Each structure stands twice: as structure tokens, then as C-alpha cells.
Image (spheres, rainbow, N blue to C red):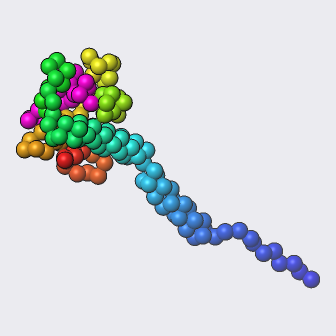
Amino acid sequence: MTHMKKNSGFTLIELLVVIGIIAILAGVVIVALNPAKQFAQARNTQRSANVNAILNAVSQRLADNRGTWPVVSGDCAALPAATTTISSTDYNIYKCIVPNYMTSLPVDPSAGTYTDVTDYNTQYEVRSYLGRVTVSAKYAEDIAGLASTTISVSR
């Protein structure tokens, strides 16, 4: 009686197919979990929330004062007609909306600075034109390959 030895194992084709499938899956996972894109998207989400919060505070102040923006000498200037950066040097909105309408003034997650109320730069912009107030985040990050990367909300 002779015993035949049966070769067990994988063929070269089977191994190449498995390696190919693993390579495709790894490529898909790396693209789906692109950390730079995920962080940029998170910062843009924060910018959008900040722009909405500032606009809500401005709108609430307008509503409380029957559609007018009270000018308080040295504390609160009129809303600018031209697009102006919200900062302690350009357009200081801090005393107009903090603490009555916001607990603190939000700043851009990657470019804004906030030392104190006399030295801050939110990197957000505000404009009031023809009864509409617009708040924008001019440093939004391009995550979709679009030409415009400004987050802007008007009311």
C-alpha cells in the first residue's frame, strides 16, 4: 500500500488575490480616515457654529432694541456698512454683546487670538447693509476643492 502525500496550502493565484483585496481595503480606509481632512472639517464646523452664535447675539440685541443698534459712546459703535474684522482694533463688538447675549466672544479655531477684551482678534467679519447683518469666517479651510472657502451667514 502506497501512501500518496497530498500537498496542502494556497496557490500563488489565491495568495495574490488575497493580497490585492487587502491592498484595496487599506487604500479605502486611508482615504476615508484622512486625518487632515477630518481636522479641517471639524474646524470649519466650529467656525460655522461661531458665526451663527455671533449673528444670533447681534440679532437678539437688535430685537431687544426694536430693530435698532444703540450706539454707546466708547463702548459700542454702530454696525459697520463695509465688511470689517471683529477685533479690538477694527470693530470692537465685545461690550455690545458680552455678557448680555454671549458668555464670551468666540474666535477662529486656528487663527484667532483672545488675550483679553482690550486685545483680541476673532478673525470673523461683520457687515450691516440694507438692514441685513452678515457675519463671515474668512479663513475657512477648503476641504472639497471649491474656489470659495468663506463661511457666511446673513439675517
Q: Residue furthest right?
A: 1
Tell me the quarter of the picture where residue 58 sits.
Answer: top left
* Residue at x 22% of width, y 41% of height: 63
Q: Is residue 119 left or right of residue 37?
A: left
User: With respect to residue 140, does 145 lie above or below?
Assistant: below
Q: Quadrant of residue 97?
A: top left
- The answer to whether residue 17 is visible is yes
Q: Residue furthest bottom?
A: 1
Residue nearest the viewer, comparing 16 with 143:
143
- Quadrant hosting residue 134: top left
Residue 138 visible to the viewer: no
Q: Is residue 87 magenta?
A: yes
**Picture residue at 27% right of the left edge, 37% below the top:** 57
Q: Quadrant of the N terminus?
A: bottom right
The answer to which of 32 and 10 lies nearer the viewer is 32
Q: Percent position (x, y) of residue 150?
A: 22, 43
x, y percent for residue 65 = 19, 36
Classify 25 as above or below 121.
below
Say which residue appears at 25% left-offset and 24% top-offset. 95
Q: How far from the left and from the top, in percent, is residue 153?
A: 22, 46
Q: In this picture, which residue range is highlighted in magenta?
A: 80-97
* Number of marks in the rendered image: 0
Magenta-colored stretch includes residue 63: no
Q: At 51% from the left edge and 60% from the top edge, which residue is drawn?
A: 25
Residue 16 location, x and y as percent? 56, 65
